[in-house]
Amino acid sequence: MQPHDALVLQDLYHDYDRLRAVDGVSLSVKAGEVVCLVGPSGCGKSTVLRLAAGLETLQSGRVAMRGETVGDPGKRIAVPPERRHVGLVFQDFALFPHLTVGGNVSFGLSQMPAAARDKRVREVLRQVEMESYVDAYPHALSGGQQQRVALARALAPEPSVLLLDEPFSGLDERLREQVRDDTLRLLRRNGTAALLVTHDPEEALFMADRIYLMRGGRIVQSGPPQDLYYRPVDLFVASFFSRVNEVGGIVRDGHVVSPIGRLSTPDRQEGTRVVVAFRPEAASLSQPVGADADGLNVEVQDTHFLGTGWIVHVLARDVEDRVVKLSVRLHGRPPKAGEKVALKVPPDAILMFSET
Ligand code: ADP
């Protein structure tokens, strides 16, 4: 028998007064899977998470955990949050200040006999390397330590699914990377299914087995991180994950004519305008080329050293002969400002979208 998905959300809608915050969202988290719900601020991510947890009243749709429906207004099912077997981790950690670390972690284990409970508390604190702080109070801990205790508290009752809302945003950058890495390893080791909300594309790429990208209350694309990065369905998805160069193109004689060359296109109508895009790291610069050769002659405008490489701005001409500025990311020494060079983009790195 197929194991049930840890979490299934089916066709969720949610309005705040007249604002439609969630507009037909469906997603699933399989057992042991780490799924990221990502998107710009205000797109409805937290509302989806709160609906999954039961913290927000479900208006329309269905929420199921391990095959059991826990929310379905049509059937008058609304299991309260504390009976949904979810672990919650939020940005502000929200540890109880008057309880010790041990007290915080044992909070959700009140049903267990005392000896088993103490054992479990120590076990999860050991997993987050906080065992020696069992008697400390939250105010005496650093942000990173509080985060780890919050994680231990959420994991202690062995939830069906862990729901995390921007759990690393309160930490400074260095610590964030460390805690993120530790959290991911812990989830993997325990085989915990998790749904993580974040506005940070890099965090989603780093953490997720699968990503759901939201915009304006809807899921615009979902799949493994590399699918969204390399095969974005539109320019919004492409530019959400990294900077992209955008140039116009027009279909002529069965090909797209664009500033970066003549490109083949699957049956687009003659005269159609398209957006041609590529990432700065996908392009290369070399010696200028003759008229018939591949590549586009451009002029270097300026260069910027980034430590890990260089950003080179070059000026090209679009199909209407207007000057367009493009960015190229290089690892080696860049050409100098004013130099004429050839810009090349491998065909498989070229993204093409219909103009909207
Ligand atoms: P995200 O997590 O992606 O930032 P939210 O789910 O928090 O998005 O919010 C989605 C939209 O709903 C936003 O426009 C936000 O202002 C609005 N919103 C969120 N919570 C409430 C609320 N309790 N009352 C009214 N509007 C809300």
Image (cartoon, helix red, strand yellow):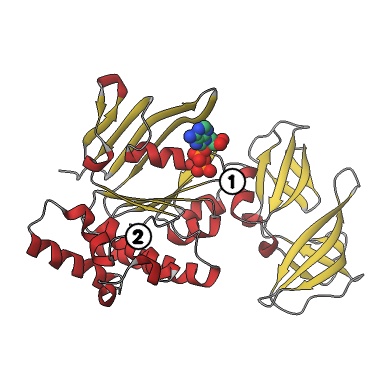
Does residue 215 appear left or right of residue 63 in this picture? right
Of residues 212 and 344, the one nearer the viewer is: 212
x, y percent for residue 330: 71, 72
Which of label 1 and label 2 is nearer to you? 2
Q: Quadrant of residue 185?
A: bottom left
The N terminus, quarter of image: top left
SS class, disc 1 = helix
Q: Residues within 10 Å of mark 2 (few under 14, many from 20)?
A: few
Q: Residue at x 22, y 53 (%)?
A: 108
Q: Quadrant of residue 147?
A: bottom left
Q: Residues within 10 Å of mark 1 (few under 14, many from 20)?
A: many
Q: Residue at x 69, y 54 (%)?
A: 244
Q: Residue at x 13, y 61 (%)?
A: 117
x, y percent for residue 238: 61, 49
Instruction: Tell which residue pokes out farthest to the front in this image.
Output: 98
Q: Is residue 28 visible?
A: yes
**To which residue does mark 1 refer?**
237
SS class, disc 2 = loop
x, y percent for residue 26: 40, 35
The C terminus, quarter of image: top right
Q: Residue at x 75, y 33 (%)?
A: 272
x, y percent for residue 43: 54, 39
Q: Residue type at mark 2?
A: Pro
- How far apart are the two marked residues, 1 and 2, measured between alpha carbons? 41 Å
**To which residue does mark 2 refer?**
97
Does residue 231 appear left or right of residue 48 in this picture? right
Is the Cβ of the residue at disc 1 closer than 8 Å to that at disc 2? no
